[in-house]
Image (cartoon, rainbow, N blue to C red):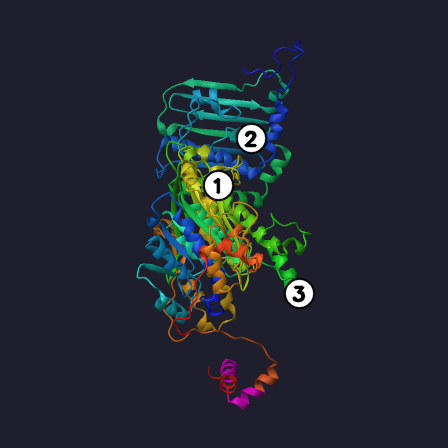
Amino acid sequence: MAGSFKKIDYRLRPAKHAERIMLIDLFKRMRFAPIETYQYIGFGSVAFIDFRMVHKALGIKDLISIEDTDDRHEKDRFRHNNPYEGLLLHFGNSNEVLPKINLKKQSLVWLDYDGSLSKSMANDLAIVGRNVPSGSFVAVTFPAFIQPTGPSRETELNRLKEEFPDFLKEHDKATELDGPKYARFGRSVLGALLEKAVSDADAGHQDPEQIRSVKQICFFKYRDGIPMATIGWLIISKSDAETFDMCNFDDLNYVRTGNEPFQIKIPLITPLEVREMERRLPNLDTANDLNWIPKEERSNFLNVYRYLPHFASVEQI
Amino acid sequence: MAQLVPTNEADLTKVDASPTKEFFVDIITKDIQLDEAIQDLVDNCIDGAKRLRPGVNADYEGLTVSLEVNSDGFRIEDNCGGIPLDIARKYAFKFGRAKGFEPTSHSVGQFGVGMKRALFKMGSQFNVISTEPEHSFRVFVDVTAWVNDNQNWDFDVKDLKSKAYRLEETGTRIEVDQLAPAVASTFGQEWFVKRLRHSIRVVQQQPMRQGLAISLNGEAIIPTDWQLKEGEGIEPAFRRFEDDLGAANPLVTRLYAGVGDSNRTYAGWYVFCNGRCILEADQESTTGWNEVSENGVNVPKFHGQFARFRGYAFMDSDDASILPWNTTKTGLDLESDAYRRLVGRLIEITRPVITFLNNLDAEKEFEDSDKVLSIAISKAPHVALEKIAERPVFNYAPPPKRGPALARISYQKPRAEVEKLKEVMDAQSNRDLGEKTFEYAASNLSEES
């Protein structure tokens, strides 16, 4: 959230776009309360794309964006880019801003970091987890990789050992975090610490039906320049367990409750190939006259076609 | 008359699991320090005051506790109502809380072990002398004789008189004359008396502020005020929580966090249960001081720069059993529901103060006139906790900045070269030279973008 808007052109991020639509699709299935009565909390950056989508697709009016800057000019730029009068901007580190926000309202919270996995993220998640009512959703996104070589590899390993001593042993090697292992490590650490925060906050609750627990609902991996991971959890009380079942989240092909991520892979295909494949829907996987399109691209297309962005050059960029 | 022996020694289907008195005496005196044991006795006086004048903010004016601690013996005397004969006979001397005991509301005694533990720790003979509205009596114990009697667990009530006493005549006096040799030697040393005085001042601050007068060896103990700096843009945090943990009334938690004078000894969290200080100036993971992170955005391990941190957590309940204290009242019960709810809140409220103190620390390098936080903190007055308004997070609201955002550059160079360049650039001071060299570099090297 700090400064990445200066480095990445937010319009050119197809996997991110797909991820946003997938999350919105998931929010549409939530039955705990009318979705338009929720508040949405995120790191909007200058473009506020997720905020526009959440408002337009779900009708949520209660919008709060956190920006980690105290630079007057940057603040000014954020204010000018704010798309809605009703969208509140909070400037400061999320660790400090989150305790100021009223989290007693059902919330959709997306902590979309651009910094490395850290204890600080776990603390943000803990603040959200402790305070939000049942039926709330919280997700965290972070770059999920360790350099395969070079001095930063050891530095990163040692930092993680120091920040998460219960999860890495003193003599663990950096190979424990290579490739897909990094995102899994993040998922397990953040999930466990969120679970602890929620359970501690409800310790000794007199009505067992109101004791909340954490259910992982998504685990995405994709490339956004670099490998990224997003993990999302629902926080629900026992009394909402039935409602949870009624949401039928499992019907969404990208819902992941365990250690295996859903890979958002954008197929590299031509517009004609898109049309050909769309015509075969929903039986694309059995269509055998499209073998001239590489199998991997067909399979990627089938996984994400509902969430792909449409590109057209309609304005000067 | 409890008889803790196997019910039938001839019964081959039973094994003996009954305790010995030595075990009791050893185990309960092992994990407590002498000053803590004495605090337990003071706690009993305070519970007397609470029974006499109920209410969370009752006025204890006129109630006194006086302690005498020296190598010849130990005395503690109060005028807080005395131990009623019935309570003494059924509960006060029993090991552990018996069923049927009606606990004092907002009690600081909880486990039914404090007095026995303290007395066993100190010596081999003691007297507990009580004057209550209807009786006066003395409980005398010769510990050695009592331990050697493996049948009978009773203590003897002596000098029992039934008579109506006026309230101001009531009270409890405890005397230990036969001090254990090591205890006598400790009690005779000045450092111990000083430490005890400090410890009572901190631990019993709340009841003393309600008017209870505590004196040690004839000298009154003056309570210190809990204060935080407020003003000059510095706004301490104050949050209040109510948790239903199954008692008749919710557990009320009040948290204050902010800054005070720079002093490592007094910095940290203070945690109180029913007014009793359980943790003093805690700088350990118990109160959240372990959340390390390279970029410094968590609650880090305690460093020198946090010597100005002060946090006060007050937890109050009419039912003392839901409070998160351990039996020696020197630490928190980390498994308790109340603690599990507390620790996250401590981390949350500590965090903004840490950022402020990190920024304050970073000012060390600045020119004096730029040390805005240092100036603010030195000017801000101390304010008593009860005058602090509810505010979810600690805040520092600096005066609005003018002009573009500035960055600071600081570096060191050999003095001779600096002097030479100063002349070349006609600079009046090192600072002036720094600015002139920067401007020179900027005008020659920057390209317009």
Circle 3 chain: A
Q: Residue B227: give x, y in percent of width and height.
A: 41, 52
Q: Which residues are magenta?
A: B420-438
Circle 1 chain: A
Quick one: label 3, few (<14), some, or many (20+) residues within 10 Å?
A: few
Label 2 and label 3: CA atoms lie apart by 61 Å
Query: In the orientation shown, which residue stands out farthest toward the front?
Result: A289
Residue B425 belongs to the span the image colors magenta:
yes
Q: Amino acid at mark 2?
A: Arg
| Viewer-side residue, A268 vs B150 | A268
Q: Amino acid at mark 3?
A: Gly
Residue holding disc 2: B117
Residue holding disc 1: A199
Residue A3 in view here:
no
Residue B387 belongs to the span the image colors magenta:
no
Query: In the orientation shown, which residue stands out farthest toward the top?
Result: B10
Which label lies toward us, 2 or 3?
3
